[in-house]
Image (tube, rainbow, N blue to C red):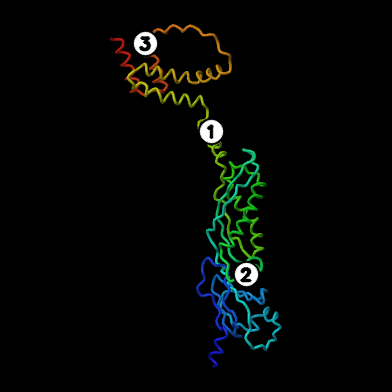
Amino acid sequence: MFDFIRKQFIDVIQWENPDEHTLMWRFPVADQEIQNGASLTVREAQAALFVDEGRAADVFAPGRHTLTTQTLPVLTNLKNWDKFFQSPFKSDVYFFNTRQQLGRRWGTAQPVTVRDAEFGVVQLRAFGMFAYRISDPAAFFKEVTGVAASYTGEQLEAQLKNIAMTQLAAVFGTSGISFLDMAANQVLLSQTLHERLRPEFAKLGVALESFTVESVTLPEAVQKALDSRMSMGIVGDLGKYTQFQTAQAIPLAAQNEGGIAGIGAGLGVGAGIGQAMAGAMAGMMQPAAAPQSAAPAEPAADPQAKLAKLKALLDDGLISQQDYDHAKNEVLKQLIN
């Protein structure tokens, strides 16, 4: 009979197999009473909170604790027990997972509209990671979980991300950093957001350990315009680019079946491409002129002039010695034939 009565009282309280995704778990007391002098074991990365009729009372750090009226000062005061109280007591015991929750991802569900110095009003998306832990079990119980049987990280993170997005919009709107400079200022953005979010998380009993911005992106249409702008920046000066293309075309033209004619064509294209483009644009802007008779065909170039031109190209480094020898042989063949 004595053993039966003794089993009605809980004398060992602990969270033996915590789920890594569970942040808060209520010890199953039900109608049983906790024995005065019972053992409370709180493991590392845990905290225990005694709750009396929905009110947070005593918090216990990691270690082994013997529960008496001396070790439960707040709960004892709530119950108006005197120091000689020996009977069992009823109270809810909540365990909290205080381990750091690492690698939590965040991202903007909807684009954030900001004013950009380069593009005007744009919509930005941002992504990154953050880490947190429960730092104040009593505040976390009061502000977040309440008297639920358990509470998971997934439930909490949905609320934390909403807070982060609100601060993100404020930081983007007041930073004054253009999108083109954001990649170089991601560390500064991360630090700014971390400082803004820490007090907001602390109100919930949560410590924000880290907050990083990994990327900031533009809408697809704006990104295409930016890609085109970057391409033009890579090309640079159009005239120099045309000269480079001409120099590249000369050796290839010399190896064609047309021989020196290929070189002439390459030279013609290289020398006249800029003028042709400018002439075409000017023609589009002016009224059409009266048709003129075709100009007479130019006489064939003098072989000596061709050789002199080839030598000049070789001296300027526009063609290789091999290309020069090949073209010179073609001219000499025409002289012999």
- Residue 255 at x, y percent in the picture: 33, 22
- Within 10 Å of disc 1 (Cα), the crowding (few <14, some 14-19, many 20+) is few
> Foreground mark, 2 or 3?
2
The label on residue 137 is 2
Please identify the quadrant where the N terminus is shown. Answer: bottom right
Q: Circle 2 — which element?
A: helix
Query: In this figure, which residue is indicated by the disc labeled 1?
Result: 233
Please identify the quadrant where the C terminus is shown. Answer: top left
Residue appearing at x 67%, y 63% in the figure: 203
- Of mark 3 and mark 1, the one earlier in the sequence is 1
Query: Which residue of the protein is positioned furthest toward the bottom in this rendering?
Result: 1
Measure how far apart labels 2 and 1 are at the Cα level.
Answer: 56 Å
Q: Nearer the viewer, residue 166 or 211?
A: 166
222 up-or-down from 325: above or below: below
Left or right of 275 in this view: 309:
left
78 up-or-down from 128: above or below: below
Q: Quadrant of residue 312?
A: top left
Assess whether mark 3 and mark 2 are in contact (beta carbons under 8 angstroms): no
- Residue 158 at x, y percent in the picture: 59, 59
- Of mark 2 and mark 1, the one earlier in the sequence is 2
